[in-house]
Amino acid sequence: MPVSSKEIEFPIHTSTACQLKWSHSTLFLNIGRTASCHRVSQDNIPNDFDFHNTPEKLEARKMMLEGKRPGRGCEHCFNIEDAGGMSDRMMHLKHPDILAPPELASDPLAVRVTPRILELYLSNFCNLKCVYCHPFFSSSIEAENGKHGKFVDGNVKIPGKTVYSKIGNPLKDKMFAWLDDNIEHLHQLLLLGGEPMIQPETLEMIGLLEKKTLPDLTLVVFSNLTVKSDRFASMMQRLKALKDAQRLEGIRIIGSIDCWGREAEYVRNGLDLDLFRSNIEYILDETDFGLNINSAITPMSITSMGDLAAMINTWNQKRRVYWTFMKVNERHLNPLMLGPTANDLGLQRAYDILDPMDDPDLI
């Protein structure tokens, strides 16, 4: 077995090197695509399922070793750096949770390597229809688009039927076979959706983890937490048993919600706030899992984000609950179109209400 990458730092220090290109992979199983970060172009998953070493990724690593910019989306970071900013690339070079591939211990110039972080989009099976989402991530939106067809109103265009749902995706079996052979090299395994907690593949994943002892692995699950209480509790207990038996290093749940109250249930169509709160409190009371809230900022959520901040304050009385954000980029939902008025509409109120409790990492 190669030397653990915990024993080395990322050894590549050229002016264009990106640790994500060596250490991180995302798999979109329902469309057969892969990427090394969310900013870059996606590649086809090869027939041999060596998704971390596609020709495109190998070429990008070779160019970075030569101090060249590989393009294909990497311009996002380099444009920020050229303007004097701090890019994702720069932040990830020293990020403590991104470990170097084990091959770099013996060959610091290796380009064919093993990933340390794996993001899995198992399918688009989802029980919500968030207003800013896409059929690629939600089978419920996909079904609605198939029923109603194309929608066009001014600059707002929603295409008709596009098939993202796959029954019996053969890549799923290849993915589980790869994990069975390679999961001991991973430092983080992230499950995204769709909604992982209602997807049958997630139960298969827990079954795989129950057969392994992975003291270096942290499992991260993103969820809308609108999951029936009995199913949710059963899943949490199985995960808790893994953690208690020290079969995993850690477990973190990322609860996805944008604001609080009626606005939250409107923005995330199908959300059940009572169920969301019950499941959050179950995590806090019955487990020691790490817990985050992740919010998508839109003009529709800003006005009641302060109410969510108040809820987070309440949860923080029991245990730290961290709050992270992303903005929606679609033109009609991008909060940047509000300019400074976004603060007056609710962002400043949310900032003022949230109590950091002397923890600089809370927001």
Image (cartoon, helix red, strand yellow):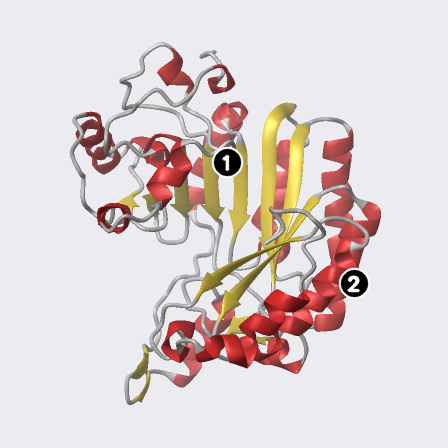
- Element at label 1: helix
Q: Which residue reaches farthest bottom?
A: 153
- x and y percentages locating residue 271 in the rendered image: 64, 72
Residue occupied by mark 1:
176
- x and y percentages locating residue 130 in the rendered image: 52, 72
Q: Amino acid at mark 1?
A: Phe
Q: Would you identify the image quadrant in which residue 164 lies? A: bottom left
Return the residue nearer the eye: 81 or 236: 81
Report the residue at 24% width, 27% height from top: 14
- x and y percentages locating residue 311 in the rendered image: 73, 66
- What number of labels is visible? 2
Residue occupied by mark 2:
278
Q: CA distance from mark 1 to mark 2?
A: 32 Å
Report the residue at 35% width, 46% height from top: 86
**Is 55 situated above or below 295?**
above
Quarter in which the C terminus is drawn: bottom right
Q: Residues within 10 Å of mark 1 (few under 14, many from 20)?
A: some
Q: Is residue 36 visible?
A: no
